Amino acid sequence: MEKIGIVTVTFNSANVLRPFLNNLFDQTFSNFDLYVIDNNSNDATTKILDEFDDNRIVIIKNDKNIGVAAANNVGVKKALANKCSHILLLNNDIEFPNSLLNDMYYSINNNNCSLLVPKILYHSDKNIIWYAGGGFKKSNGYLPFHNGFNKNNKNSNYSSSLVEYASTCCLLINKNVFEDIGLMDEKYFVYFDDTDFLFRIKKHGKHQLFYDSNITLFHKVGSLTKSLIQNDMKKTYRSDFFLSQNIRNHIYFLRKNGGLYCYLYCVFLFFKNNLRFFISPRIKKDFSTFILINRSYFQGLFL
């Protein structure tokens, strides 16, 4: 049987790691290797990893945080070198049934596709959808969207189908995709790395992405990336890290894809981002945040 190379990136993941590993090593499909790329965690992450004595685990410890895209690439290269037929990019802030790998492996083959993604529900409320297929919205600067986002799963009708976009929270990929498309763009430290990768696949046109609504996992959304902060008055704001990465990476993504529309949208975003500074309740109203927004914009232009 063909082997799956599972790639997961850890960075201070101690609070989610044990249930993830327990779920993984309880799978009915056992022909896999797990490549854990640790981005210099300073909590108990590596100690927990050492508790799991299984020869299918390959732990690669970076001496600094190199970002999600670069870390994923380290794992993908290892898996390809070890002759894995499929690569599963997998977050570790998820929980899933013991049939996940088996169901995904057979679905990607039965549906004759190159990439496969399951339905993803919130772990905090297992009746609510986080992802049920997705695509890119040109009118929003080609930002990706999730079908069924925040809707009740019992009332949804998002059936299995070919789609354009999937988060790399859980994405099974035939090795041929990397041979044709290449690896993740390491200029994205975090955010937009999956957007860029799936958009390149869409533009290439050879490989199809299938959403299987019959396969489900549960995502602990926001548990690893701190996109929101609270001040002393208990008001919630977007963190500086979230703002800088999203603004910078969206501009870089548009500039990279080129074309008149993308360049015009970059100009539009300059005014939109500055307007949001003044009107959005989620953005701190101080001079340092204003400078951060505009500095991030120009970093994206010249990245």
Image (cartoon, helix red, strand yellow):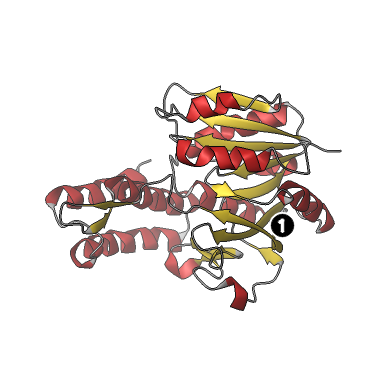
- Mark 1 is surrounded, within 10 Å at the Cα level, by few (under 14), some (14 to 19) or many (20 or more) other residues, namely some
Picture coordinates of residue 125, whole percent (x, y): 51, 63
Q: Is residue 123 left or right of residue 113?
A: left
- What quarter of the picture does the C terminus occupy? top left
x and y percentages locating residue 102 in the rendered image: 78, 48
Occupied quadrant, residue 12: top left
**Residue drawn at (45%, 29%), measured in percent from left and top?**
44
Q: Position of residue 7 (x, y in %)?
A: 62, 37
Q: Is residue 180 left or right of residue 16?
A: right
- Residue 61, percent across and down? 51, 23
Furthest toward the top, the residue is 63
**Amino acid on which the number 1 mark rests in the picture:** Gln
Q: Say how many tags the image has.
A: 1
Q: Which residue corresponds to mark 1?
A: 208
Residue 26 location, quadrant: top right
The residue sitting at the left extreme is 287
Looking at this view, is 240 or 292 the one in front?
Answer: 240
Residue 57 drawn above or below residue 222: above
The N terminus sits in image quarter: top right
